[in-house]
Every structure is written in structure tokens, then in C-alpha cells.
Image (cartoon, rainbow, N blue to C red):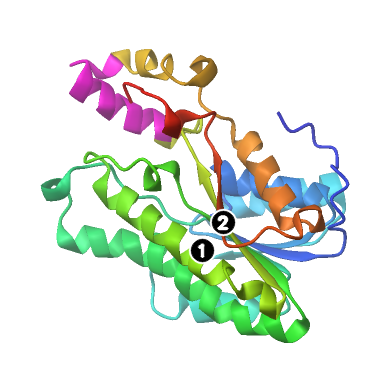
Amino acid sequence: MFSGESMDLNLTGKRALVTGASQGIGAAVARNLAAEGCDLLLTARNQANLDALKAEIESAHGVTAETLGLDLSEAGSVTALAEQAGDIDILINNAGAIPAGRLQDIAEDQWRAVWEVKLFGYINMTRALYDPMKAKGGGVIINICGASGERPKSNYICGATANTALMSFSMALGGDSMMDGIRVVAVNPGPVATERLIELTKGSAAEKLGDPDRWRELWDTLPEGRAATVEEVADAVAFLASPRSAYTSGTVVTVDGGYCNRGSLM
């Protein structure tokens, strides 16, 4: 687990934008980058959570943390965020949550609404900041997708499809972005210990075991009998964003304890 100490990743003085920063993986990434000396622009829909995180980060690490509460599905939000971002070195695309469900469980308008944030939000933020990064001489774009893109399942079809698309987007763009001084990497977290995962697991337990109260039995099938911590994912993201990973682009880094390559009840 992250100790709050710097890993000495040579990120001091860099400026990073983290979307979906109010909780979970996004908040953990923000804490790690702050510990490495990055100034931050944090965005999410929950302004109160952002303000609390800003106060914590500035007190603990002496960096500057700006916040902007907005919904990336709303018209003009990407433009507004890109304008405030200005001269950014690191973009962490992390916003968006997609509900579980089979093909007919999720109505078309809901598919479009959640993809507007998770899929098109990532693409549009990248489009908005790519040329400014190129003009200043380089940068790093990390798209936090999800291991369901590697191991798609019918009961999470909307999320799996979006994550697979984002993996391809990251690999295609990152294949030649280093010619512009920009690295693009996708990070695929497997099961991560968050409230969202608990709710998803309860649904799986109801479907597979007939009892949502037995959801912890499914976690027992994970590597080491547990889900990843947000800090474990955030550590990988911080390293990939740093000059220590300067030759990494156009690839997918999976943080799942081998989950995608083994059998599981989940």
C-alpha cells in the first residue's frame, strides 16, 4: 500500500490533470502524483469531495491543486476543462462508471449516456490536449480502462465494449505519438476494492450463487483472495506517467494479479 512517500520519479514541477478524481482510483492517483511533486487540476462531478482532496493534498505535499466540478457528458464541458488545463504535462483519463447488465438490460439512451463520459470523454479530452502537448514538446496521456476489455463478459457488455474500444484507441494513438513527443498508455485495473466493485459483486453473487449476501465468496476466488487496492493501481499509473517509463507507449498495462488469465467465478 502507498505509504505517502515519494518514489523519486522525477515528476517535480510537472502539471497533471486527473478526471474522475473525487474518489477511488482517481483520488489515489492524485495523491501519488502530488507526492511526486506534481501540481494538479482535479475534476469530477462531486465538488465537495474535490475540495476535501485539494485541502489534503496541499497540506501534505505543498503542491498546488486546482479543482473544477463538472460533468463531462454535458455540452461544452470538455472545452471548459481543456481551457482551464492550459499548459498540462500529464493527462489521466479516469472519469466514468458503466453499469453491469446484459444486452437488453441497458437501454440505448443509457448506453449513450455512459459512453459519453467513459468512451467519448477520454477521446475528446485527448483530442483537446494532444496538440497543446505537442506544441510544448511532449506529454503523457494515460487512459484508465478496465480489465473487462481483455476478458469481456455478457453480464458487463456495455463496459467491456467501451474498455476494448479504449484499449484500441490507446494502442493506435500511442503507436506513433512518440514522434510528437507524447506517450499514450492504457492501464487496465482488474477487480479493485471499491464500493462500486462490492455492488457489482453482489449482482454476480445473486446471479451465480442465488444470494447477494454471499458476495465475499466470489472475492475468495481472486488472486490472494482479495481485490487490488486503489494504491496498487495508482502506483503503476504514477510510474507510467514518469520519465522512468520514457520508452513505454502504445501498450496496455494490466494490474489484475493475473485475473484475466485464470478461471474465476466472478
Residue 76 placed where, x, y %?
44, 81
Residue behind mark 1: 170
When asked about the image quadrant of residue 120, the answer is bottom left
Give 64 or 126, whichever is nearer the viewer. Answer: 126
Q: Which residue range is magenta in the image?
A: 197-213
What is the three-letter code of the residue carrying label 1? Ser
Quadrant of the snapshot with the C terminus: top left
Towards the viewer: 3 or 138: 138
Circle 2: residue type: Thr
- Of badges 1 and 2, the one in the foreground is 2
* Residue at x 55%, y 29% (from the top left corner): 228
Decide which of tag 1 and tag 2 comes sooner along the chain: 1
Quadrant housing the N terminus? top right
Residue 55 numbered mark, or none: none
Q: Is residue 186 above or below residue 32?
A: below
Crowdedness of circle 1 by 10 Å Cα count: few (<14), some, many (20+)?
A: many
Q: Is residue 177 left or right of residue 246?
A: left
Residue 256 belongs to the span the image colors magenta: no
According to the picture, the residue beneath numbered tag 2 turns out to be: 251
Tell which of 249 and 202 is nearer to you.
249
Residue at horizontal 64%, vertical 77%?
A: 84
Q: Is residue 202 magenta?
A: yes
Find residue 206 and report its horizontal and vertical position in percent: 21, 22
